[in-house]
């Protein structure tokens, strides 16, 4: 036993950084080398086809299937020149990962030989035999067919020998079975609604794009140590492990020097990401030991989501080249910071970012305020839903854990913006009317003074913070598909902007001048959505009480939080924006509850195994050594002296007996509780049973295991400890 332990830790120490081959070209030269981007489209497609395809990509024009054959031929030519032999439709089912099934380009040529083939039909649509993807009951076994369909707005790319074609994934009956289909619908809805509102200010606006810049946090762990932790291997987090004496209390890791082995990993990751067209820019150490962050330059939301999915799989792959495993779990280690994925979100038109305070131009300032206030309204009205969109069994460990945003959605605006909103709110109706004429516009719209909103004003405790030219949705989990949060946010805003336009138009119809009508509605909105605005300390207990008084969603049980998707106002919002139907929402919630249950179930099983195969045997072995010692003391010393000398060991023997008995009893009880929960038919009730009954038991068991870790001989303890997992790099 002791031998194995030393072997594991030693291999970790011996690892040297791998030399990373840096391409001879500069990043600007190899950027997007593996992407069928516009430059390649231009080279490989007939000019007419190129024009049509870029119209689809840039302007959302409908896809003309007649060009598919030529696009496929161009793609194939480029891909085969790059040494590619296979292709796959690449999609995001309702799991955390991506799905792909690789097919070779080869077909019979009819003359007994083979030829490379890739037709428009294969590009546009496929029918993956995908009956085992989560679908929440939408596809029963009779109608198990699902279609994957090409998304031309995200470019095809090459991974190894395979051409990957981003696709949506839908059921035979049309319901979405993935993240991308509703995301594209949400982006289209927000585009349309926002263009309509933008035209109050500039009739030329044709398109509004939602942007996303994610910041991916992660941990790296030595692969030898990882392999010796069944919990990391099976669940992505440590189910046991006592705090290490030193962890993050000295705050010496954040922005610290990047260890050489980690730097080598990052370098290779960045090179490969750039080749795949992911504009990675920032890397640094995070707060916790062995925790790091990677962020690209923001991109159009759909592309940014694809790039995040791609980078997560790239990270997993490249970490192995460096003897690491990457942990994307939101909370791999108890007691130190978890990992999030801040979603920096904004809207922009063909003329610039809409959430950027432009400064002197009054019309632009009013437009800025319009979008800020409507965003706040959307977040206020759907705060429970937004929380549901980022909730999962894994993210639950992070939220509210005094380092991540609390499990209550609120928005931080900072001093300047708060003052501007207060100013508008306090202005009287008469002020507003006096503004409406040309004179008022020239008078800089007194309600909206010259804006100089900077982003130095930061509040790390806010789940939805305004940071100068964007909102930062910080509650998103590190492992999550960003699409979930982006679907909820963009759809909610689409609904809100549509209603805003109706409210303003109603006033205009009554004869109120446009600017005055807009300000009037905004003033009302500022009052209504006030409860969502919170600039204080989100970690404090006072905030929890205050948020409840304000009527914000304060639920902390994840399975119950999911109910938000099925509230009448959520269903209405998703249906009116055309993003999802009630049937889809119901099915997706089934999947969410089922996934929740399965995750906890797996953790509980692994914990049971650890107790029976690691903890109890090792603790008992050590206890036996102690007992042996006590007996031998008796034969060496007179009874009274032996007893005195053995007092401490006797205490330890007893403590081990008590704690091992406790964990064994509780593992048995947990198995019984699972049996009861497993019999529950309703997925929601089952998930709640797992949340209410199993999760607390796991915590209790863990407590005693962690205490045992402190007293049992280090050489015997089979599981690598926190100090090793966190400090070996
Ligand atoms: P910080 O850690 O200070 O929040 P980072 O530089 O790590 O900042 O990440 C900020 C992210 O926000 C980057 O991905 C950046 O490209 C993105 N970002 C900046 N401006 C916008 C914007 N207007 N809309 C969306 N994302 C943005
Ligand atoms: Mg950030």
Image: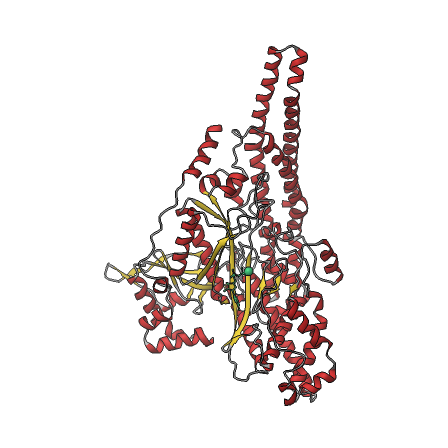
- The answer to whether one can see residue 278 in this image is yes
Q: Position of residue 256 (x, y in %)?
A: 50, 50
Quadrant containing ligand 2 reads bottom right
Which residue is more in the foreground, 469 or 705? Answer: 469
Which residue is more in the foreground, 662 or 268? Answer: 268
Q: How many marks?
A: 0
Query: Residue drawn 66% across and 67% down?
Result: 415
Relative horizontal placement of residue 665, taking residue 235 as reference (left or right): right
Reply above or below: 425 against 140: below
Relative horizontal placement of residue 348, taking residue 708 as reference (left or right): left
Type of colouring: secondary structure
Q: Where is residue 625 in the image (x, y as percent from the top left)?
A: 57, 21
Please identify the quarter of the rendering in which residue 313 is found: bottom left
- The answer to whether one can see residue 178 in this image is no
Please identify the quarter of the rendering in which residue 631 is found: top right
Please identify the quarter of the rendering in which residue 608 is found: top right
Q: Position of residue 659 (x, y in %)?
A: 65, 31
Q: Which residue lies furthest to the right in this view?
A: 549
Which residue is more in the foreground, 588 or 343? Answer: 343
Q: Position of residue 638 (x, y in %)?
A: 65, 10
Query: Residue drawn 72% across and 56% down?
Result: 544
């Amino acid at each position: 036993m002791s031998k194995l332990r030393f072997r594991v830790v030693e291999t970790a120490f011996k690892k040297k950084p791998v030399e990373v081959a840096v391409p001879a070209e500069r990043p600007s030269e190899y950027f997007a080398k593996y992407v069928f981007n516009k430059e390649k489209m231009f080279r490989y497609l007939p000019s007419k086809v190129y024009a049509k395809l870029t119209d689809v990509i840039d302007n959302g024009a409908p896809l003309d299937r007649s060009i598919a054959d030529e696009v496929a031929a161009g793609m194939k030519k480029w891909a085969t020149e790059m040494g590619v032999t296979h292709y796959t439709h690449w999609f995001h089912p309702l799991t955390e990962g991506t799905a792909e099934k690789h097919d070779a380009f080869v077909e019979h040529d009819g003359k007994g030989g083979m030829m490379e083939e890739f037709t428009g039909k294969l590009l546009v649509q496929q029918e993956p035999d995908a009956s085992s993807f989560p679908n929440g009951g939408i596809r029963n076994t009779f109608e198990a067919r699902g279609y994957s369909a090409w998304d031309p707005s995200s470019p095809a790319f090459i991974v190894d020998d395979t051409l990957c074609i981003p696709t949506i994934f839908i059921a035979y009956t049309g319901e979405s079975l993935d993240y991308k289909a509703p995301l594209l619908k949400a982006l289209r809805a927000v585009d349309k609604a926002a263009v309509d509102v933008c035209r109050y200010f500039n009739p030329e606006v044709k398109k509004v794009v939602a942007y996303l810049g994610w910041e991916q946090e992660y941990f790296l762990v030595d692969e030898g140590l990882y392999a010796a932790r069944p919990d990391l291997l099976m669940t992505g987090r440590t189910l046991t492990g006592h705090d290490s004496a030193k962890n993050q209390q000295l705050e010496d890791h954040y922005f610290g020097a990047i260890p050489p082995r980690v730097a080598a990993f990052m370098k290779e990751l960045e090179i490969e990401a750039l080749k795949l067209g992911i504009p990675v820019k920032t890397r640094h150490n995070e707060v916790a030991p062995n925790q790091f962050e990677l962020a690209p330059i923001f991109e159009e939301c759909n592309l940014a989501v694809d790039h995040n999915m791609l980078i997560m799989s790239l990270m997993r792959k490249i970490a192995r080249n460096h003897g690491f495993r990457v942990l994307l779990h939101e909370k791999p280690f108890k007691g130190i910071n978890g990992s999030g994925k801040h979603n920096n979100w904004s809207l922009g038109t063909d003329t610039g970012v809409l959430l950027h305070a432009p400064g002197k131009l009054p019309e632009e300032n009013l437009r800025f305020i319009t979008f800020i206030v409507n965003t706040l309204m959307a977040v206020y009205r759907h705060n429970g839903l937004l929380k549901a969109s980022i909730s999962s069994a894994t993210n639950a460990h992070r939220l509210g854990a005094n380092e991540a945003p609390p499990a209550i959605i609120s928005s931080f605006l900072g001093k300047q913006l708060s003052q501007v909103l207060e100013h508008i709110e306090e202005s009287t109706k008469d002020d507003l009317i006096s503004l409406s004429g040309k004179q008022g516009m020239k008078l800089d719209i007194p309600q909206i003074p010259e804006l100089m909103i900077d982003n130095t004003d930061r509040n790390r405790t806010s789940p939805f913070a305004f940071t100068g030219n964007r909102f930062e949705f910080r509650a998103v989990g590190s492992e999550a598909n960003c699409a979930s949060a982006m679907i909820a946010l963009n759809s909610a805003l689409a609904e809100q902007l549509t209603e805003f336009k109706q409210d303003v138009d109603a006033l205009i119809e009554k004869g109120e001048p446009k600017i005055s009508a807009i300000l009037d509605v905004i003033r009302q909105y500022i009052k209504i959505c006030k409860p969502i605005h919170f600039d204080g300390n989100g970690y404090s207990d006072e905030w929890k009480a205050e948020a409840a008084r304000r009527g914000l969603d304060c639920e902390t049980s994840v399975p119950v939080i999911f109910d938000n998707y099925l509230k009448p106002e959520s269903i209405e919002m998703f249906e009116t924006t055309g993003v999802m139907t009630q049937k889809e929402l119901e099915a997706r919630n089934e999947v969410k509850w089922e996934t929740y249950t399965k995750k906890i179930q797996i953790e509980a099983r692994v914990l049971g195994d650890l107790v029976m195969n690691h903890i109890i045997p090792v603790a008992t072995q050590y206890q036996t050594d102690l007992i042996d010692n006590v007996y031998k003391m008796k034969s060496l010393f007179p009874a009274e002296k032996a007893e005195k000398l053995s007092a401490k060991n006797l205490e330890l023997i007893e403590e081990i007996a008590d704690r091992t008995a406790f964990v064994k009893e509780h593992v048995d009880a947990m198995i019984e509780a699972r049996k009861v929960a497993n019999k529950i038919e309703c997925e929601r009730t089952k998930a709640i049973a797992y949340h209410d009954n199993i999760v607390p038991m796991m915590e209790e068991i863990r407590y005693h295991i962690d205490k045992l870790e402190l007293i049992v001989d280090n050489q015997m303890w089979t599981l690598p400890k926190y100090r090793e997992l966190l400090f070996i790099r």
